[in-house]
Amino acid sequence: MIDDHARPVGDDARALVEALDPEQRLAVLAPIGPVCVLAGAGTGKTRTITHRIAFLVGTGAIPAGQILAVTFTTRAAGELRGRLRVLGAAGVQARTFHAAALRQLGYFWPKVAGVALPRLVESKIALVARAASRLRLAPSRTELRDLTGEIEWAKATLLTPADYPAAAAAAARETTHPADVIAGLYDAYEAVKRDAGVLDFDDLLLLTAAVIEEHRWVADELRSRYRHFVVDEYQDVNPLQQRLLDAWLGERDSLCVVGDANQTIYSFTGASPRHLVEFPRRFPDAQVVRLVRDYRSTPQVVALANALIARAGAAGAGTAGAAGGGAAARPARPAPLKLLAQRPDGPAPVFTEHDSEPEEAAAVADRIRALLAAGVPASEMAVLYRVNAQSEAYETAITAAGIPYLVRGGERFFDRPEVTEAVRLLRAALRSAQDDRPDGLAAQVSDIFAALGWRSDDPPHGAGAERERWENLAALTRLADDMVGGDPEATLDRFVADLADRAAHQHIPTVEGVTLASLHAAKGLEWDAVFLVGLVEGTLPIIHAQTPAQIEEERRLLYVGVTRAREYLTLSWALARNEGGRRSRRPSHFLDGLMPRSPASAGGPTRSGTGAAASGESGAGGQRSRNRSAVRCRVCGRPLAGPAARMGRCETCPADVDQALFDRLRAWRSARAKEQGAPAFVVLTDATLMAIAEHRPTGVAELVSIPGIGQAKLDRYGEDVLALVEGRALPEPVPAPAPASSSSSSSSSSSS
């Protein structure tokens, strides 16, 4: 390894280092070789890795063109490039794994295979549908999406169709079809793909790795081009991506990885923090740096985040790979990063309980309106939920309040009709070179947008499609203003080129509206005010999270949500779905010990979290909301929480499962799920079926005592379940009753 003290350090490089805190400086000055940066939320990880890269380039240690930095989203890659350009390291390659692989494979494949690289398909779903047809399967749209996800998981974890059934069982994958059927579909999908002569995104990584592994001259050429690698968000690497990284590295160790095992939330796709956790074991000489100074959030938000993650169980960050990666060896769980707040004090987090989802959404809209009046911009507020189906109630309430909003994860910004039309007009204006344009870039852009009926001083009243259209065009004009602020001589052609670059890398401008997003979609973002909503058992943790590792991943998802907030944080839940409905829901057990002894309730005063979370201390056992009773083990009587509560029995207590009944229940559930066009777990989870097969209820009273059987499940499935238990013929189906509300289900889909 090369010692930094042996390298000349100029004034510019010295200035790079002096701008950092002690831990960041340690990471930047680490010798060339294996470096592992464990970076907590808000600790400046992007700042650290870009300064390290710029320092290596600025001191002449490594030429810019010989560094490859990889991350997971085009937005993150664009941000890396932008920061490196400002720091004087514009020649560094910063790409996603897939973009880097496509560039390399496009160059080497014709030389290796003698033919052009096959066409790349953006989505697998059409090919999976064709494969299903070959097997005479007729999956619903929802099932087709889930089956595609299973194939993607298998490929990401380097499984063949023959490997899939055993690995799926080991990883406790809950699927819409039996494992052998999915394995057959996976095999058929690969055949359909070969027949069509196309590649999917997983093939890009696999073929790039294979070409490097099998052709020495390819490996030599690539490794001579790239001498140093940086991997951002390393906790999200899956086995396929790690294989490609290993192929790039060869026997070398010039690698810097950055990540946080506490933010591993993509295990269901095959991601695993195992590579991050085991990095020092793989590279014994690695320098490990822990970034814990949180510059994003107030001490009150940081205390809540620390208290939440400190309660992670033995299946926490270090074993999260089991949730998605099969039976891989489980590393010991490292001590969680405990964040140290650097900002001044702010308001304590607020916990609120409501009688129904519409009332919860209305309260959030009222709070947003109050924050707007206090000067917090709409673009600095976000409502975050576990599943996309939860957004409807909040869209309705926020629209009724006349507040603009945008739903993140929907249509891409640069694909929206008004944005594409605006860009088309800008390009046309550039070609026409009219002499009557006003002076200055900002004025020119406003003049061009007038052709679309847009005026800066005339926003539409309230929310809705027209307001969203106006805000999207306003976001483009603000980009022009920002460019002029940096360079008063900025021109229209430069602005058009900047928009093209942003569109290519999905680097979207700030749109003035409240963000509605899933917790997964919120990763990597931050706002002044965050509302975490729908925090009830069955939604967070999601109902199909059954294993300890899956439950702890749900906890980390809530942790990610908490750490998105800079100053204002509200956590809320509703006891019933509809107004006037039965208040049978329980707040998420993740809130145990975190919230004050009496959360604010609907119609009552708002109370802040001044208890355990605010002080960073463990809470008392009595911190439970009204209407919440403990579930007890039906064998030994001990209180239960998490997956054991849904099972109704301690994991260590003896089970008495009627296997034949369990098999009948699973077959019945599969048929009902197919009728409804929904995943099987939406009907009843495996844990609930297991509890039924153990308890063998003889009537309604015994059936409703089983966790997972509420009034809605009882009304819809109770007669069927009791008939199956008694061995009777199933009752004749009756038409499903019309829904009582337009509120969307909060447990029928998960986001990614």
Image: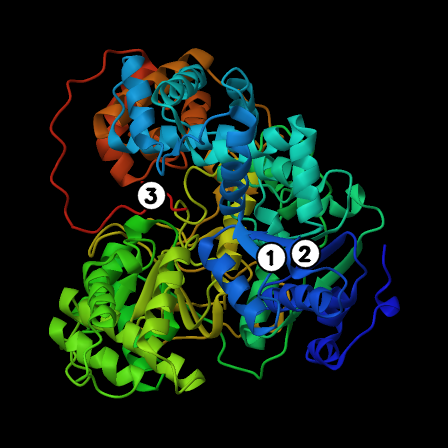
- Mark 1 and mark 3 lie on one chain; the one further toward the N terminus is 1
Q: Amino acid at mark 1?
A: Ile
* Residue located beneath label 2 in the image: 336
Expressed as whole percent of the image width and height from the top left, the position of residue 441 reads: 30, 82
- Mark 2 and mark 3 lie on one chain; the one further toward the N terminus is 2
Residue drawn at the location 14% of the way across and 82% of the way down: 458
Expressed as whole percent of the image width and height from the top left, the position of residue 302 reads: 58, 70
437 lies left or right of 343: left
Residue drawn at the location 68% of the way across and 32% of the way down: 217
Asked if labels 1 and 2 touch by Cβ distance under 8 angstroms, the answer is yes
* Residue located beneath label 1 in the image: 309
Above or below, 337 relative to 545: below
Res. 89 image quadrant: bottom right
How far is mark 2 from mark 3, CA to CA? 29 Å
How far is mark 2 from mark 1, CA to CA? 7 Å
**Helix or strand or loop: what does disc 1 sit on?**
helix
How far is mark 1 from mark 3, CA to CA? 24 Å
Res. 729 image quadrant: top left
* Residue located beneath label 3 in the image: 747
Res. 604 image quadrant: bottom left
Above or below, 730 relative to 245: above
Can I make out residue 702 in this image? no
Expressed as whole percent of the image width and height from the top left, the position of residue 435 reads: 19, 83
Of 680 and 123, the residue lying toward us: 123
